[in-house]
Image: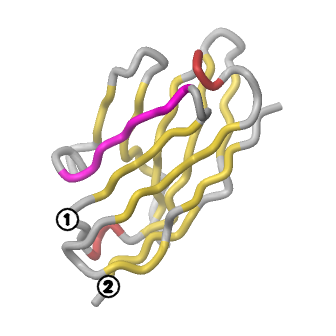
């Protein structure tokens, strides 16, 4: 069983920065793809960024150039550095682990990010 725990959310002014962290339990982290998703009230959960086990990254068009996803396999942790934040980035941010070999997907509980002056 894998548990994902997000942290680092909060209230920030437009143009500010935040770094989210997602710590994973278990031994499959380093061989799994990781992703960040977000869900605003009334909206579906949308892709923010993903990173494969070998470090290949992918971003949503709305976040590319402002957000950076990275991973530290020694710490079983994935990060999301968010810069130049906008009010429309306000959402609950979720961490996802996907392991193709065992076809399992795990989600964290989410962390709230609010961008407001």
Magenta stretch in the rendered image: 66-73
Give coordinates of residue 104: x percent, y percent: 70, 24
Whichever of labels 1 and 2 marks the residue nearer the N terminus, that label is 1
Q: Which quadrant, please, contains the C terminus? A: bottom left
Q: Quadrant of the N terminus?
A: top right
User: Helix, strand, or loop for circle 1?
Assistant: loop
Classify residue 1 as left or right of residue 66: right
Main secondary structure of the magenta stretch: strand
Q: Is residue 74 above or below residue 107?
A: above
Res 115 quadrant in image: bottom left
How many numbered marks appear? 2
Residue 29 relative to residue 27: left or right:
left
SS class of the residue under badge 2? loop
Name the one closer to the observer, 106 or 70: 70
Residue lying at the far front in this picture: please name it.
74
- Image point 71% across, 13% down: which residue? 102
Res. 116 mark: 2
User: Disc 1 to disc 2, how far (Cα)?
Assistant: 12 Å
Q: Quadrant of residue 88?
A: bottom left
Lateral position of residue 66 relative to residue 88, left or right: left
Judge whether 80 appears above or below 88 on screen. above
**x, y (%) of residue 112?**
52, 70
- Residue at position x 25%, y 67% from top? 85
Q: Which residue is mark 1?
A: 84
Outermost residue, right side: 1
Mark 1 Cα shell of 10 Å, populated few (<14), some (14-19), many (≥20)? some
Residue at screen point 37% across, 47% down: 48
Q: Position of residue 22 (x, y in %)?
A: 57, 47
Specify whether residue 96 is painted magenta.
no
């Amino acid at each position: 069983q894998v548990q994902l725990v997000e942290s680092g959310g909060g209230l920030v002014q437009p143009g500010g920065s935040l770094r989210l962290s997602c710590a994973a339990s278990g031994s499959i982290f380093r061989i799994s793809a990781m992703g960040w998703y977000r869900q605003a009230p009334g909206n579906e959960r949308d892709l923010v960024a993903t990173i494969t086990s070998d470090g290949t990254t992918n971003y949503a068009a709305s976040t590319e150039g402002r957000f950076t996803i990275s991973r530290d396999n020694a710490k079983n942790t994935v990060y999301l550095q968010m810069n130049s934040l906008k009010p429309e980035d306000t959402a609950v941010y979720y961490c996802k682990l996907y392991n193709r070999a065992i076809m399992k997907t795990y989600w964290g509980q989410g962390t709230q990010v609010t961008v407001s002056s």
